[in-house]
Amino acid sequence: MSALTLSTSSAATLRADAVVIGIAKGRPSGKAAVSVAPGGEAVDTAFGGKLATTLDTLGASGAEGEVTKVPAPASGVKAPVVLAVGLGEAPAEGEPFAPEVLRRAAGSAARALSGTKKAAFALPVEDVAAVAAVAEGALLGAYAFTAYRGNSGDAGKDAAGKKSAKAEKAGDASAPLAEIAVVGAKPRDKEHKAAVERAQVLADEVHRARDLINTPSNDLTPKTFAAQAQAAAKEHGLKAEVLDEKALAKGGYGGILGVGQGSANPPRLVRISYTHPKAEKTLALVGKGITYDSGGISLKPAGHNETMKSDMSGAAAVFGAVVAAARLGVRANVTGWLALAENMPSGTATRPGDVLTMYSGKTVEVLNTDAEGRLVLADALTRACEESPDALVDVATLTGAMVLALGKRTFGVMANDEAFRTAVHEVAEDAGEDSWPMPMPAYLRQGMDSPVADIANMGDRMGGGLVAGLFLQEFVTEGTPWAHLDIAGPSFNESGPYGYTPKGGTGSAVRTLLRLAEETAEGGLG
């Protein structure tokens, strides 16, 4: 993990391998098409006030995330390289840059500086929110998954993705930026210090989720995932309970067992909990943890299997959020439920047409074994409701329909209460994660009527993401505020990296869940 410090030194005089400044799209003035953002004044002075003109000549436009590197002048700047990152349109006079703009810019700069030892970030940090955004973005952008590269011999030994010693050596182009100094912040200010400490923990846990998602399924099974949760619980003073296949059978968890029975790697249900001695409210989080999804007997078509190691992204997000809440001492009780299984086709696998008896006692006709996530979530939701939480949120890579509806960067939010759905959506936006509130039309429920069971696991094809939400609602105790986050789109990035988002596992929803825990502590949820 990259080290992060606050510095009162001038960006021009701080010793570093690079200094990062922001540039915005300039206003029509007949001069340079870009302008140097607040924080970069000292560097601009070293360029004789002509840094914007220099960048303009090099083709810099100030577009969000655009990165332009220039050699520092012979004197006036200690760092040998100046990296200008685009912030987009300049805000109105007297208005600050939006936190998410700064977060993405810092992430883009950090990614561009892979293999660098130290960089000074001289971006606009006019308030605590800006300090937090720059710190978060830089740390989130400074990420690389290198466990299976190089010749260290460690690859595959750690289910969480042990970093190769060779790949982490300073100067390796694949190694993340090692040291980050946020210039212009106040090291002795309590709010600034708290913001940076939170950013460090948050980035740690997002990276934990990313590592888990990126780990191949031959190394991350339900058993090894559960072991990771137990190890983290021991390290951070949490409680962890793991139900293996025998305990699941004894407890009547028909959904989790039904999904996992076709695999040589049996399922697990993990309860990982953080308790604060002065907490007044409890938030329960449930995560879908399908460590590999072949589709089961309803086998996925060619071209849809290669990224299915990421079908446990919801459980990874819940895991990371619970640990983050504990490390930050959030004044709320937070319980995470990780519903872990591997969905495989075999002679023992659940068949289309089979009927499962769920933990709730309801029966489900399985029409499609590739609609397995809702089955494991249903059991975990019912179990979570038994503890009467003040609020309940599940996270899952649940439906391709949600990707079709919202694209690959936005997750859907459904809920059994409109006000709660709005609150969760607003928290996600505040955390910097794109989300969109989705409806759950009652008429779609009848499409899941079954002639042989209480409900089928499939309904109308059109509106499939909404149907999945309606199915889950059947297993939530009436009166419990509940929201469902379908992160199928943003959980795994198959295209090129952007902002602070890497290629591969993204850690989507960790930031939202942590903020929900903080809102719970502040009395804003439940």
Image (cartoon, helix red, strand yellow):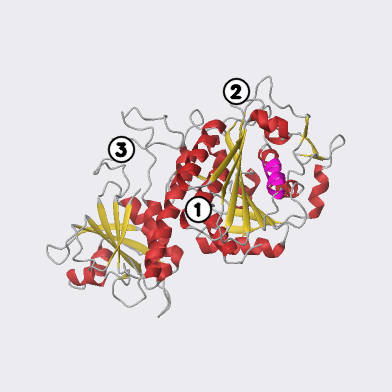
Q: Quadrant of residue 262?
A: top right
Task: Mark 3 vs mark 2: give the one in front.
Answer: 2
**Label 2 or label 1, whichever comes before in sequence order:** 2
In the picture of the structure, the residue carrying the numbered disc 2 is: 264
Distance CA(mark 1)–CA(mark 3) = 30 Å
* Residue found farthest to the right: 451
* Main SS category, magenta section: helix
Q: Amino acid at mark 2?
A: Ala
* Residue found farthest to the left: 74
Percent position (x, y) of residue 458?
Answer: 75, 40
Mark 3 neighbour density, 10 Å: few (under 14) some (14–19) many (20 or more):
many
Q: Quadrant of the C terminus?
A: bottom right
- Looking at the picture, tell me which residue is in the foreground, 349 or 19: 349
In the picture of the structure, the residue carrying the numbered disc 3 is: 167
Query: Is residue 449 found left or right of 178 in the rendered image?
Result: right
**Label 3 or label 2, whichever comes before in sequence order:** 3
In the picture of the structure, the residue carrying the numbered disc 1 is: 326
Q: Residue 89, can we see it?
A: no
Q: Residue 284, can we see it?
A: yes
Under circle 1, the secondary element is helix
